[in-house]
Image (cartoon, rainbow, N blue to C red):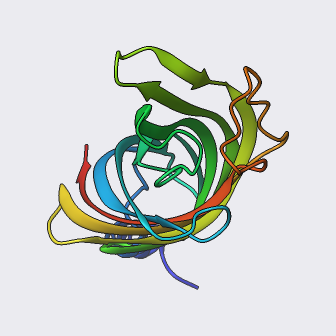
């Protein structure tokens, strides 16, 4: 049996070893990612340019949340009906997502899903809005974040977007698309705070 001074020394040594070997506490992270890429498949006849930004919060564990805005230019392409009348068309989305990310130092693999407000919009040559609708939908996907330093990294993301209801074009305008769904692949520069 150890004498009291020896027991105290062993206990102190054990506490120091535990403090040194214990993993560092996980910190909460705020992640800002401006991104660009392509929207494709679904109701799209060919890929379209998309860009936007996301702002997320990852807690010390696996789960977090994220809000994002994205814009798909020329979503409906060249329209068959009155192609000279419609001068621009796009789909904008605002999303709120839950993220599940594998915690790691420089590489984080994640899955994401949430609700999206999708807004298709068409305007004519006089800048009059021909069609604008807010459609509630969902998105799901995932990706990979690779941090090159403590605060800067790159992010690749692949997501699927779909509106719950079909488009109601009205006003005699037919754009040849009823459902609103597409895939989106993006790459962005990520800033971690």
Q: Is residue 49 visible?
A: yes
User: Looking at the picture, does residue 133 appear above or below residue 28?
Assistant: above
Towards the viewer: 192 or 6 = 192
Q: Where is residue 115 in the image (x, y as percent from the top left)?
A: 71, 40
Q: Is residue 103 visible?
A: no
| The C terminus sits in image quarter | top left
| The N terminus sits in image quarter | bottom right
User: Looking at the picture, does residue 111 appear above or below residue 163?
Assistant: below
State the residue lying farthest toward the right: 165
Q: Position of residue 61 (x, y in %)?
A: 56, 56
Image-quadrant location for residue 13: bottom left
| Residue that appears at 42% across and 56% down | 25
| Figure disc tally | 0
User: Looking at the picture, does residue 103 appear above or below residue 76?
Assistant: below
| Residue that appears at 75% across and 33% down | 136
| Residue that appears at 50% across and 31% down | 122
- Position of residue 43 in the picture relative to residue 155 (left or right): right
State the residue lying farthest toward the bottom: 1
Image-quadrant location for residue 188: bottom left
- Position of residue 60 in the picture relative to residue 99 (left or right): left
Towards the viewer: 139 or 176 = 176
Q: Position of residue 143 (x, y in %)?
A: 49, 71
Towards the viewer: 42 or 97 = 42
Towards the viewer: 78 or 90 = 78
Q: Where is residue 10 in the image (x, y as percent from the top left)?
A: 41, 76
| Residue that appears at 58% across and 63% down | 44
């Amino acid at each position: 049996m150890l004498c009291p001074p020896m027991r105290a020394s062993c206990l102190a040594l054990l506490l120091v070893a535990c403090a040194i070997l214990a993993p560092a506490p996980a910190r909460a992270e705020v992640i800002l990612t401006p991104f660009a890429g392509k929207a494709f498949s679904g109701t799209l006849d060919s890929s379209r340019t998309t860009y936007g930004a996301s702002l997320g919060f990852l807690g010390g564990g696996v789960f977090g949340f994220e809000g994002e805005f994205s814009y798909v230019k020329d979503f409906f392409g060249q329209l068959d009906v009155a192609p000279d009348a419609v001068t621009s068309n796009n789909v904008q989305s605002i999303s709120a997502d839950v993220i599940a990310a594998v915690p790691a130092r420089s590489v984080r693999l994640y899955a994401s899903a949430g609700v999206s407000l999708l807004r298709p919009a068409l305007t004519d040559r006089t800048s009059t809005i021909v069609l604008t609708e807010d459609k509630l939908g969902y998105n799901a996907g995932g990706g990979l974040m690779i941090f090159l330093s403590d605060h800067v990294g790159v992010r690749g993301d692949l997501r699927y977007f779909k509106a719950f209801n079909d488009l109601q074009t009205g006003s005699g305008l037919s754009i040849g698309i009823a459902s609103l769904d597409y895939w989106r692949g993006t790459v962005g520069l990520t800033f971690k705070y």
